Amino acid sequence: MFKLAIPEELGIPDDTLMIRVDIFSESIVLTDFCNATVKTKMVSAHDIANSFVKELTFSSGFLPENTLWWKTTKIGPVHAVYVDSQIRTISLIKSELKKPQRYLIPLPPLVFLCTPCRSPWVYAVKEKPQSENDAVYKAPFYNVYSTGYTCGGSNRYPSDPQGIIEMFLNSFFSPHLGIDNRVESGVTIEQLWKKLRGKRSFPIDELVKHGTIKDLINQSMENDRA
């Protein structure tokens, strides 16, 4: 019984314990007191979550243009946003004592995984994805870990996906992170950027395979720097 903190003269009965959930380091045990016989059984976190899901409501809110999918994770909602190929200025800073170098270059189509107020994950694609089996490639940028997660540096990312994408593309990139096997020809990212000056399209054959769209959908968002 659970004693309610209300005056006894109101005649409101004690709250009766019906189900108890005990969470151990390696198991979850549910005890059912609803019937004359107390029953105990092992359950999963998935079972517990499903029992309460009918009490919850979900909304993605307003979805950005070209949103491919949306999901909830332990770190918050994630929007996957497609960005078509474009020509734009990329800034590279090698030393705090020197002015940044700027490259007006074509970029391949990109997929960003955005969660509020965090640096995004970024990947390249050959065209707008149409299925979970479509290939995904390493994005030809510095400051990107092998998982696709990006180093935020001093950026203070906003909550909206479009703002996150723009902040990343407008960042000052550094050659000290994210140089692992990102270009098929073996040149550095900076050498690639230099070659792309004056070009109208990105050489898709330079992209290095990362996985598939299905891999991005199913990947753990907590393992960001591996």
Image (tube, grey):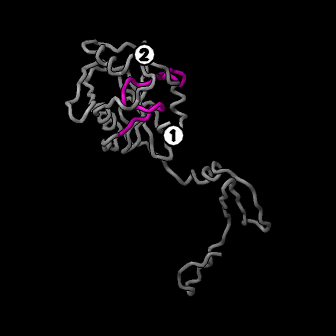
Q: CA distance from mark 1 to mark 2?
A: 27 Å
Q: Quadrant of residue 191?
A: top left
Magenta stretch in the rendered image: 129-152
Q: Position of residue 221 (x, y in %)?
A: 49, 40
107 versus 67 height, above or below: above
User: Which class describes the residues within 10 Å of circle 1: few (<14), some (14-19), or many (20+)?
Assistant: few
Q: Which residue is mark 1?
A: 223
| Nearest to N terminus: mark 1 or mark 2 | 2
* Above-or-below relation of 47 to 35: above
Q: Residue furthest bottom?
A: 9
Does residue 149 belong to the magenta stretch?
Answer: yes
The amino acid pointed to by label 1 is Asn
Q: Residue 6, percent across and down?
A: 53, 81
| Front in this rendered view, residue 85 or 223 | 223
Mark whose residue sits in front, 1 or 2: 2
Q: Determine the secondary structure under disc 1.
A: loop
Q: Which residue is mark 2?
A: 186
Residue drawn at x 28%, y 33% is: 172
Q: Main secondary structure of the magenta part?
A: loop
Q: Which image quarter: residue 107?
A: top left
What residue sits 35% from the left and 39% below the top?
152
Q: Could you tell me residue 11's position as x and y percent?
A: 59, 83
